[in-house]
Image: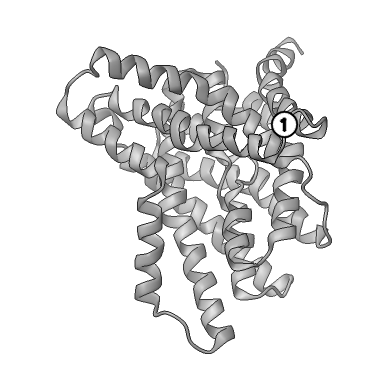
């Protein structure tokens, strides 16, 4: 019992900060432009600095963890495929909607929730495996979703761009993502073998230290007011895949590839996180699955208040 209380005492404050963001919007203390400003600060400044430091302050050999990338990525793709087929065959979704159903099942809210929460529980060293998982999600999983959405649109309209052009467009958009740019910059700096100069070290550390609370607060502000829509069976399916099936699949992948226990725990906890907001963002761009995706984000985040501490209790001994 004392161990459970200790875990709750560590994790619940993170979710409480999410609640503070929601309360700020609910009580009118922060309007939409202000919430957008916090989001911009987190997305373009604070989290990129945290991600950059996760790579730049380590030796190059330490961050070349292709074994972890494969052990996390391939099970995530399997979960994506299974959820995609469930959406297509069971719920009779259109191709693009099924792609978003799969994306919700396999892409964690690792940026705004996972990095501050997992690093807060396991220590700052845990940020690196979480960021590597984010890299997979952005470069592989979300790109697949965009391709399937484009194919679906082309079928519906009887034309559209070629798959090659769509792929290049998706990858070009991914390459401009601040998280990807931060990873690239961090890896390049690590390759030099140099320490960060004093002013650069202080600047990036100040912004990185602000990333956790600001990201959680921004997440809460963005979740407030999301509607509970129809299609609750699909919402339940996405939440089940994301919070239960995804972490189990990733745990099996780590076991089969004999991944270092610390990295494995960080990866499992990343997979156990709720649905990422990008399912709403990508869906909104194509006008598909917006209401159900939004509902799934909210529902899975609420459930995660209990499920994430449970996952920590199972896999992390401290």
Which residue is found at the position 71% from the left and 29% from the top? 21
Asked which secondary structure carries label 1, the reply is loop
Classed neighbour count for the residue bearing mark 1: other residues with Cα under 10 Å, few (<14), some (14–19), many (≥20): some
Q: Which residue is mark 1?
A: 30
Q: How is the image coloured?
A: one colour
x, y percent for residue 92: 72, 75
x, y percent for residue 203: 36, 18
Which residue is found at the position 79% from the left and 44% from the top? 225
Which residue is found at the position 65% from the left and 41% from the top? 274
Above or below, comparing residue 111 to residue 242 in the picture: above
x, y percent for residue 275: 64, 46
Quarter placement of the C terminus: top right
Q: Nearer the viewer, residue 289 or 87?
A: 289
Quarter placement of the N terminus: top right
Q: Nearer the viewer, residue 47 or 308?
A: 47
Rendering quarter of residue 4: top right
x, y percent for residue 29: 76, 28
Q: Nearer the viewer, residue 306 or 193?
A: 193
Q: Please state if 91 lies on the left or on the right of 182 as rendered.
A: right
């Amino acid at each position: 019992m004392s161990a459970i209380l200790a875990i709750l005492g560590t994790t619940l404050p993170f979710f409480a900060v999410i609640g503070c963001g929601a309360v700020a919007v609910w009580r009118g203390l922060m309007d939409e432009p202000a919430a957008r400003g916090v989001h911009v600060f987190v997305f373009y400044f604070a989290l990129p600095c945290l991600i950059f430091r996760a790579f730049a302050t380590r030796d190059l050999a330490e961050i070349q963890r292709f074994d972890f990338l494969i052990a996390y990525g391939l099970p995530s793709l399997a979960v994506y495929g299974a959820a995609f087929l469930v959406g297509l065959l069971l719920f009779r979704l259109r191709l693009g909607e099924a792609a978003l159903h799969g994306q919700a099942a396999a892409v964690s809210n690792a940026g705004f929730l996972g990095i501050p929460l997992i690093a807060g529980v396991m220590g700052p060293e845990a940020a690196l495996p979480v960021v590597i998982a984010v890299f997979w999600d952005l470069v592989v999983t979300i790109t697949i979703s965009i391709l399937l959405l484009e194919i679906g649109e082309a079928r519906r309209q009887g034309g559209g761009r070629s798959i090659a052009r769509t792929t290049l467009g998706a990858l070009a958009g991914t390459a401009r993502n601040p998280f990807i740019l931060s990873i690239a910059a961090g890896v390049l700096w690590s390759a030099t073998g140099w320490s960060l100069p004093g002013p650069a070290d202080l600047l990036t550390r100040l912004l990185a230290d602000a990333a956790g609370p600001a990201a959680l607060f921004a997440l809460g502000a963005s979740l407030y007011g999301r509607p509970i829509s129809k299609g609750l069976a699909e919402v339940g399916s996405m939440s089940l895949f994301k919070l239960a099936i995804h972490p189990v699949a990733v745990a099996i992948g780590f076991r089969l590839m004999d991944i270092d226990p610390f990295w494995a725990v960080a990866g499992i906890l990343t997979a156990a996180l709720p649905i990422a907001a990008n399912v709403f963002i990508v869906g909104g761009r194509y006008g598909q699955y917006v209401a159900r995706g939004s509902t799934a984000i909210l529902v899975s985040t609420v459930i995660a208040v209990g499920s994430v501490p449970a996952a920590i209790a199972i896999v992390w001994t401290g």
